[in-house]
Amino acid sequence: MDLLLKEKTPSTFENAVTVTGFGKFNILLLLVIIPANFASVFETTTMSFIFSPAQCDLDLSLEDKGFLNSITFIGMISGGLIWGFLFDTLGRKKLLVCGYLLDGTFVFLSAFSQSITPLIICKFLGGFIINGPFAAMSAYLSEFHCAKYRSRIQLTIGTVNTIGTIILPLLSWAILPRAWEFSLFGGVYHSWNVYLLLCSIPAFYSGIVFLFLPESPKFLMTTGKNEKALKIFRKVYRINSGEPEESFPITELVDETAIPTDSKHGGKVTANRTKIQALKEGWQQINPLFHSPYSIKMVLVCLIQICNLQSVSMLRLWLPEMFQAIEDYKLHHNGSTDSLCTMLQQLKPNKAVTGCTINMDNAPVYINSIIVSSVSLGGYLVTGSIINLIGKKKILVILGFLSSISSCSLYISQNNATTIALSSVFTGMMSICINVILSVVVAIFPTTLRTLTLSIAMMIGRIGAVSGSMLFPVLLQIGCFPTFFYIGGTVLCSTLLCFLLPYTENKELR
């Protein structure tokens, strides 16, 4: 009876992945990406929390802190094109395994740093590695979900990232205030060394878990491995529906290698090609990215991402230091507070003060960071439930304008509560915008260009992150007004560019 229900004509990827449904496998996949997302968050954010406890051990200046905040992104920029090309030509799974294991190794090694130089080297190499797996994971997840759920998947990744930004200050609060000091292998280690050591666990765990997950069926179809793709579809169908694999109604998939490219600049894809063939043909496959219409779309999303990441990095990566400055101001003024701009004067070096002291009575620094991340989490939950109703473009425009207003309003913030509220709104909404743009990239670029485009967009965005992180202390030295209004103006520019984005709602993957 089941055989009578089976489709007689070759099925497209979109039809096949829709038939597999949404069930246990998809939930398992979303659970698996939790530590993988944590690894990405930890790689880019841990420096923000160790500045205060490592201040004296590493003799950090304000410029050193800006550089350490930026060095991971510099590594991401240098590795973006390489990883994107490899993932789109050699596949997702194996490189995900290698990428996360390598990232864990560099985070582990950074924990043994005794000076700023080895820490910089490890953070650079960690950034070089982590950019690839994070971009590939976005494509990998999207290629296991049909159009109905695809918009929400990228927001789910963003939600998990936000949970990671909640976990990180909790871990920091538990470890960093401890007055630990012990000798090992000829070095002296403190709480921040232990903290970095623990931050390597999610990356190692993710690399091992991806060993047991299947390759993306969309990538397999793109390279002519339809039988392998069909086996994966059947397994996913069995796990989701509880029905035997034999009852999967699709018996044949469309041969995507026989479909003519939609651009005169494109190259061919050989079915069941070798790794050497894949590398050779990969250069031909990515050629359409540099010609119309894809080149225009790529430039647009890259401009939006560079504005978004520059603005959000200027504030998010410096929030722990801002909160620390508030606590230091309260310590020196009998518990009283002032306007944010006045309290931020604590970040500027005071040449009249000699010696190095650390204010370890700083629990509000971690509590405030947790509050900011919790608000972001709430924003993701709300956005995930309405994005299909409102649409990606409207979400980007609305949140962009609100983010710009909240950033500029920080200039007139007169107390700690207002600062936390405005920071929460800004970081939460900008984080959502960054992830919505990535879901737009998944929708408007085909499989053979998808991970590379994601990598390029993120790589260009990281240029904004580097410049933003290093620009913040420079602008702060000039004054409070240029700092926060520059952030707001940058967000406004990216919001206006969003009006040019194409319609992508429920668009099938190619």
Image: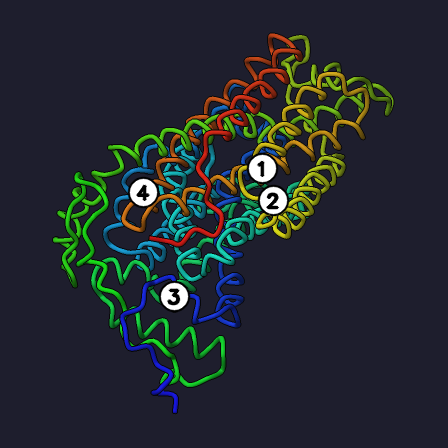
**Residue type at mark 1?**
Lys
In three-dimensional space, the C-alpha distance between marks 1 and 2, rounded to whole angstroms, equals: 6 Å
**SS state under label 1:** helix
**Residue type at mark 2?**
Ile
In three-dimensional space, the C-alpha distance between marks 3 and 2, rounded to whole angstroms, equals: 25 Å
Marks 1 & 3, CB-CB < 8 Å contact: no
Q: Quarter of the image holding residue 259?
A: bottom left
- Return the disc, 3 or 2, that comes first in the chain's sequence: 3
What residue would you read off at disc 1? 394
**Residue type at mark 3?**
Asn
Q: Position of residue 377 (x, y in %)?
A: 66, 47
What residue would you read off at disc 3? 15
Q: Position of residue 261 (x, y in %)?
A: 20, 48
Which of 154 and 411 lies nearest the eye of the viewer? 154
Q: Position of residue 499 (x, y in %)?
A: 50, 29
What residue would you read off at disc 2? 390
Which of 445 and 457 lies nearest the eye of the viewer? 445
Marks 1 & 2, CB-CB < 8 Å contact: yes
**SS state under label 2:** helix
- Return the disc, 1 or 3, that comes first in the chain's sequence: 3
The mark found on residue 452 in the picture is 4
